[in-house]
Image (spheres, rainbow, N blue to C red):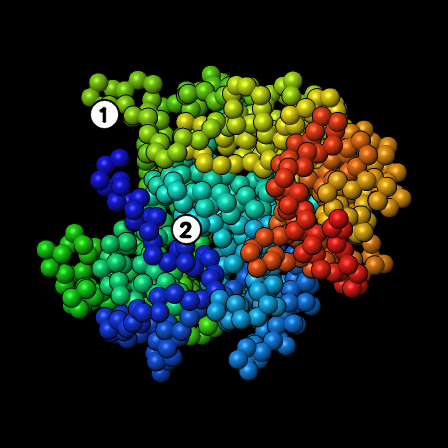
Amino acid sequence: MGKRSRQRQKNQSSGVGRDNRDNGSWGAGYADIVKENQLFEDYYKELGLVPEGEFEQFMDAMREPLPATIRITGYKSHAKEILHCLKEKYFKEIQEVEIDGVKLEAPTPLSWYPDELAWQTNMSRKIIRKSPLLEKFHQFLVSETESGNISRQEAVSMIPPLLMKIESHHKILDMCAAPGSKTAQLIEMLHADMDVPFPEGFVIANDVDNKRCYLLVHQAKRLNSPCIMVINHDASCIPSLHVATDGWRDALFYDRILCDVPCSGDGTMRKNIDVWKKWTTANSLHLHGLQLRIAIRGVEQLAVGGRMVYSTCSLNPIEDEAVIAALLEKSEGALELADCSADLPGLKTMPGVSSWKLMTKEGQWFNDFSEVPSSRHTQIRPTMFPHTDKDKLASFHLDRCMRVLPHHQNTGGFFLAALVKTAPMPWNKRAPKQARKEPSAAPAPAEGAPPTEEVPPVGGEDAPQGDQPPPAREPACGPPPHKRKKMFGFKEDPFVFLSEDDPVLAPIQSFYDLSPDFPKLNVLTRSHEGKKRHLYMVSKELRNVMLNNSERMKVINTGVKVWSRNSDGEQFGCAFRLAQEGIYTLYPYIRSRMVTVSVEDIKILLTQENPFLSKLQSKAHAQAKSLGMGSIVLRYQPNPEEPLEPQCPIELCGWRGKTSIRAFVPRNERFHYLRMLGVEVFRDKSGQGGAPREDGEEPGEDGEEVESKETKQDTEMATGDIVGDSDGKMESDQP
């Protein structure tokens, strides 16, 4: 990797505000940094972005700590239950808490976020430590965050996905995705209908930094979606992908693109306090070119009629309106700004500006590129200034851009613009097309077969020509053939799709009585040889992308785990047990191995280790006794006549032993389900305690689960920490 490539990666991965605005923290830190920067104040005073008479309020807000915000994941059927738990238990109790003689202010919902699924609080870590009740609330947030039911995310970071107007069939690209809070929102929106295990759409989340890609994987994994793929590329030259359609391999164009570019991050000063001493106008000048290249690459891959949201956590027009204006000019009418001012009622924004100036870090101002001395032309480019043709500038409608100012709604600073593509980009229309092999000579690869090296004809006149492979024969005077791109970072295990007649699938199909429409071809594993330890599933559309682009992209992670191998599982009829991560994906296809459980049954299963079958209520007991040993599904169906019970279905993985039964559910998910049932769970002062065990123990020789010393200790602490349900009954079964 050359010097320029390394610098580009550094720039993309170190946009100052991105991590900080995605992960809403609980205040604190940097107390010794003086929150003053005279250059910053002079610059924004002169630009006039803040309404007249409000500049002091603006600066005062910038010096205040940023409130913490949480978002309840909207696609899970449990979202309403979590919201009910928060409002009726924790928020009501917080209102009664006094710290140093002052009553705490309860969290408030963000007025512009749909369905009260986002909340804001001014509580800092210091305050939380002063009250046991607040400590329980904090543990609740941490546990639910790890389970994927709550995200701690800055308020302004939640806005871009809401402006994308996502539907379940959309193909979505997140160009600069890490650490992944907005990616999680995109996934949630795809799964708005939880009755559809495989939406037609998908999310491809990209980041240039290999290490940050694993933060992205962690965020995405919490949502257990088969429709997400994480890739590792430079966003400014992200490769064009292809999909097979009726024997053709066509270019993939995205319906929605999120272009949340690296930026100087001066909108994050309230939390990323380091920016106060590091901020200079040179930061924006250095990033403008990269931001424009990423945005251009995004609109190249956008489908006609599609929408791309460009966003930064910078207030500087050089990174904001200047990039949008340059993009609109280059598009020659193929792009237009959408008016989103009415899309989020309650959100206060300022319209974009059509006039701005440029200042160097020495304090020198330039109104136009003609004023810039030639010695500075490498740092200051024409695209950084407003267009000199006033009529053309007016046709851009830059007032449709949106800028969020911190003092208006106690948030960070942010900039957004939604672009709609109305025609192919002009340089794609003009580019000469290379001679390609006829489609009849390039049949689609057989199901389960690896993709061929050669790329057949690419459909769509908007296909970026620069990313197409060279013709089979180059003219004598032509350039040398392209070298295969080198992939950097950790070498991932391969992604291997199973064939329809793979011997692993037959016993699984029989044991769980999978329905005939179960998509076997969507099952993959991570090894070519040896025993398959885990089986994963992706959607049909992502499978198409992977099979046709294995040499074009570096995939970090995809798929949701649906089965894990048991060491001695064959003696029970199937070598693979169900994995809790994939139960909501698999459940619609499973027609046997079901046990219908009640609220009381779930409490027993989640608080006791290997309870006897006789402890279950009669219906569940009879169903469990009728099944042979092995993996099972524990299904709770809500009863509308019992409003105090959870009003959403619950599916848990379990194991039927000789005389006992147990739940195979990770610790934090046990916390989650117990709280939904009205059972209060908290950890002791050492940070221990919680759910009885982690998912992952293997069955013993007699079909019972092996209980390790560590698991037994977890069980004792967990059952001892469950203090009572909403009826006041003790739920502890500690021996």
Q: Is residue 403 left or right of residue 614?
A: left
Could you classify mark 2 by the number of other residues whose Cα lies within 10 Å: few (under 14), some (14-19), or many (20 or more)?
Answer: many
Picture coordinates of residue 386, whole percent (x, y)? 27, 62
Labels 2, 1: front one:
2
Q: SS class of the residue under badge 1?
A: loop
Q: Would you identify the image quadrant in which residue 379 lies?
A: bottom left
Residue placed most toward the observer, 624 or 698: 698
Query: What residue is shown at x 58% (from left), y 24% (from top)?
Result: 532
Picture coordinates of residue 419, whole percent (x, y)? 43, 54
Dot label at residue 479: 1
At label 2, the amino acid type is Cys
Pointer 2 with pointer 1, Cβ within 8 A? no
Residue placed most toward the observer, 714 or 377: 714
Could you classify mark 1 by the number of other residues whose Cα lies within 10 Å: few (under 14), some (14-19), or many (20 or more)?
Answer: few
Residue placed most toward the observer, 728 or 6: 728
At label 1, the amino acid type is Pro
Dot label at residue 259: 2
Q: Quadrant of the N terminus?
A: top left
From this viewpoint, is residue 248 visible?
A: yes
Q: Is residue 663 above or below residue 532?
A: below
Q: SS class of the residue under badge 2?
A: strand
Query: What residue is shown at x 30% (from left), y 69% (from top)?
Result: 33
